[in-house]
Image (cartoon, coloured by chain):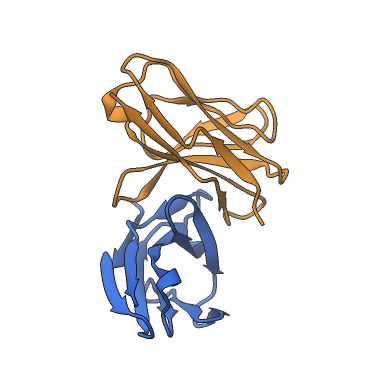
Chain colours: A blue, B orange
């Protein structure tokens, strides 16, 4: 059975801290890994990773995939209160469907 | 910017009622999805469609049904709501890849 495990499940930091969110997976016929940010309701797309070792970067957020070890990390540097959200990791399997993890709830305190 | 809309945003309804959750997108995406999400839990795929007149059940068994008569519209129906159906329902659409755009969700409470 396809599985995506995120850690930690929740994290509380202070503004300015750097955080690393983890996502490990076991899926058949891996195609891609996606990160989403979920504030209140609608998840919004952050990154899509398909190749190992290539870092995707957007402002203070970056992500990298390790297909050999079956995991990805999402880094957020110089965190701000607006980064508070649930960060979801999802993996596309051979069936072209996404399997989601439970998410990491990040709280950034001023 | 994604244009996908769900209505209603919140719904409280009595047991046994029939309900339809609406989802519309203006991007012309062929693929559309319905996910169910309980607090603190994963999104679970309950239905998906790869085009008009195409619907499939997802990985999580659901008593709901869907239809796809028009590309832009993917409503979800519960014939007889029960308290166990209380959850958040998220609609999404995507183009050729699985990079999905999500609606704001419908929070359903069945009393």
Could you say which quadrant of the image residue B46 lies in? top left
Query: Nearest the camera: A32 or B73?
Result: B73
Q: Residue at x 31, y 17 (%)?
A: B15
Image quadrant in which the C terminus of chain A is located: bottom left
Q: Residue at x 27, y 73 (%)?
A: A12
Could you say which quadrant of the image residue A90 lies in? bottom left
Query: Nearest the camera: A99 or B91?
Result: B91
Report whether residue A56 is seen: yes
Count of labels shown? 0
Q: Is residue A89 above or below residue B35?
A: below
- Residue A93, given in percent of the width and then of the height, sits at 47, 55
- Residue A10, given in percent of the width and then of the height, sits at 26, 66
- Please indicate whether residue B28 sits to the left or right of residue A9 in the image: right
Q: Is residue A8 above or below residue B9?
A: below
Q: Is residue A32 above or below residue A14?
A: above
Could you say which quadrant of the image residue B6 lies in? top right
- Residue B59, given in percent of the width and then of the height, sits at 40, 40
Q: Residue at x 69, y 29 (%)?
A: B70
Report whether residue A29 is seen: no
- Residue B8, given in percent of the width and then of the height, sits at 50, 32
Q: Residue at x 35, y 85 (%)?
A: A17
- Please indicate whether residue A56 sits to the left or right of residue A85 in the image: right
């Amino acid at each position: 059975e396809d599985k995506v495990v995120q850690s930690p499940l929740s994290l509380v930091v202070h503004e300015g801290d750097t955080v690393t969110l983890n996502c490990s997976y076991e899926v058949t016929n891996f195609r891609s890994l996606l990160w989403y940010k979920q504030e209140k309701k609608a998840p919004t797309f952050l990154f899509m990773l398909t190749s190992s070792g290539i870092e995707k970067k957007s402002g203070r957020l970056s992500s990298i995939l390790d297909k050999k070890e079956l995991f990805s990390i999402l880094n957020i540097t110089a965190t701000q209160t607006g980064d508070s959200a649930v960060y979801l990791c999802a993996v596309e399997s051979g069936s072209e469907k996404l399997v989601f993890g439970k998410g990491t709830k990040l709280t950034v305190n001023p | 910017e994604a244009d996908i809309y769900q209505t209603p945003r919140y719904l409280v309804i009595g047991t046994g009622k029939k309900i339809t959750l609406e989802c519309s997108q203006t991007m012309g995406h062929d693929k559309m999805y319905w996910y169910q999400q309980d607090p603190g839990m994963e999104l679970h795929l309950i239905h998906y469609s790869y085009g008009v007149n195409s619907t499939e059940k997802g990985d999580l068994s659901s008593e709901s049904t869907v239809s796809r008569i028009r590309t832009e519209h993917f409503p979800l129906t519960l014939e007889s709501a029960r308290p166990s159906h209380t959850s958040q329902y998220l609609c999404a659409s995507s183009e050729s890849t699985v990079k999905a755009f999500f609606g704001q969700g419908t929070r359903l409470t069945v009393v």
